Image (cartoon, rainbow, N blue to C red):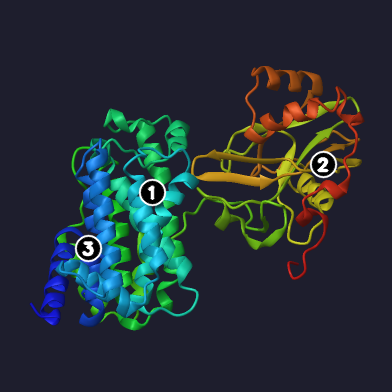
Amino acid sequence: MSEPTLLARGYAECADVTRRYGTTYWWGARLLPAARRRHVHAIYTLARRADDIVDLAGPEPGAATGAALDAFEASFWSALADGGSADPVLAAVAETVRACGIPDECFARFFGAMRTDLSRTTYETWDDLLGYMDGSAAVIGEMMLPVLEPGAEARTPARALGLAFQLTNFLRDVGEDLDRGRVYVPQEDLRRFGADPWERRVTPEWRALMAFEVARNRRLYREADEGIPTLPPASRRCVATARVLYARILERIEAADTDVFTARVRVPTREKVALSARMVTAREPMRLVRADRAAAAPALGWVADHPVVLVDDAGRALGTAPKSQVHHDDTPLHLAFSCYVLDPAGRLLVTTRAASKPSFPGVVTNTVCGHPLPGEDLEDAVRRRAGDELGVQVGELRLVLPRFRYRAAMGQVVEHELCPVFVARVEDPALAPDPAEVDDAGWVPWGEFSADVLAGRRTVSPWCAEQMPLLTALGPDPLAWPAADRAELPEAARAVPAGMV
């Protein structure tokens, strides 16, 4: 068989595999010129073959499955080294890798992730799952970049789209993955919502879990959307089609009341055909993307959408972002503060957060917390927030825990903050709470409050609960706690970063 004939046969087989198993990729790729379309089919088929070796082995892959995966990977690398293969599919894949200049390291990461499935069945945290998805999903987006010929800065959105596609697969295929002995939903999320996929039934806990994961998935689609306009017209239509069709699987999951156990959720072929036709005739495919449900950020109802200061693990400022855009399932670390306000008698002002707040609604907590504005001194931010939220004028203000940090989740919102803690004194105990922020506020003897929290008799916010043992270790009288050195504050809280005001 001549080389051109072998390649033609290989690409034909790849197209057939994509049409039968990767229908969303298939319909999206139809909008590409034939010369580039075949590369999408080749990349998909390579991934499909490796995935099938692992998945078809069932819940206990065994040594034979590992050997089969090793052999397939070796055949792939040989095809690259030799510039071809007797296997038509691998010959086509090798031609695609060569023609598009896809880096070898992408495939090394991909096969590494496939090998993980031979031994790992659960993932403790979202970060753990992201580590796996880097090689099984995000890297697929990177492989597609040379095929789609995007503009600059497309790598991050491409990775986000790969992650979004795979998370959609994970949510749709929970039942099938259970049959293989695997659970891809992070264990920390299952515990948080009290959900158990092994029950294989829809419960209130399962619905709450899936609502959280679907919201997370839609955020990834929105991140990916930023890269679609950078693509040339044909590629833009291709990716936009695949992106909208995949996101519609989430709507089908919701329409099925999150039942991903009984039957596989599918987007009907007629819907795929209709969307592809609209993409062909649309002047601007992004209009259809922006009209998709996943493109709209949820309206969580923030009282004010001020910018917050984003920081790295060392406490250095990275930039700013609106509060509504950084409080989600994977909230980036940012700067905040927490304050305990006491009157001359040593009573603590305890507040109950308004039930309408998107973040920890109705939770009992310490007096006041919030975020400094970019360039705002932390002490000024505490005084501003105490006045706006509670109508109290803070007098003496003292930094006591300069490096407190926490992460906590409730509903769709995760707090992830470097949160220095202050103690303050007021002379006038009169209050004027803002009902948009506070449902209730009152003065409680410090000793009573701290003892109840430490003993578990009073339920408070996660940050207050974590702060309490640290604060009581400073002494029994909050008004006598020693002041911390401001030099111990995170760098972003000590100075105004250039260009951030």
Q: Which of 201 and 315 is in front in this view?
A: 315
Judge the density around disc 2: few (<14), some (14-19), many (≥20) Cα neighbours within 10 Å: many
Element under label 3?
A: helix
| Up/down of 471 relative to 104, above or below | above
Q: Give me the disc on residue 313.
A: none
Q: Disc 1 residue type?
A: Val
- Mark toward the viewer: 3 or 2: 3
Amino acid on which the number 3 mark rests in the picture: Thr
Q: Quadrant of residue 178?
A: top left
Circle 1/circle 2 CB separation < 8 Å: no
Q: Mark 1 sits on what residue?
A: 214
**Secondary-structure class at tag 1:** helix
Residue with the mark numbered 3: 45
Can residue 260 be seen here? no
Dot 2 amino acid type: Val
Quadrant location, the N terminus: bottom left
For this rendering, which residue is in front, 330 or 348? 330
Tag 1–tag 3 contact (CB < 8 Å): no
443, above or below 305, in the image: above
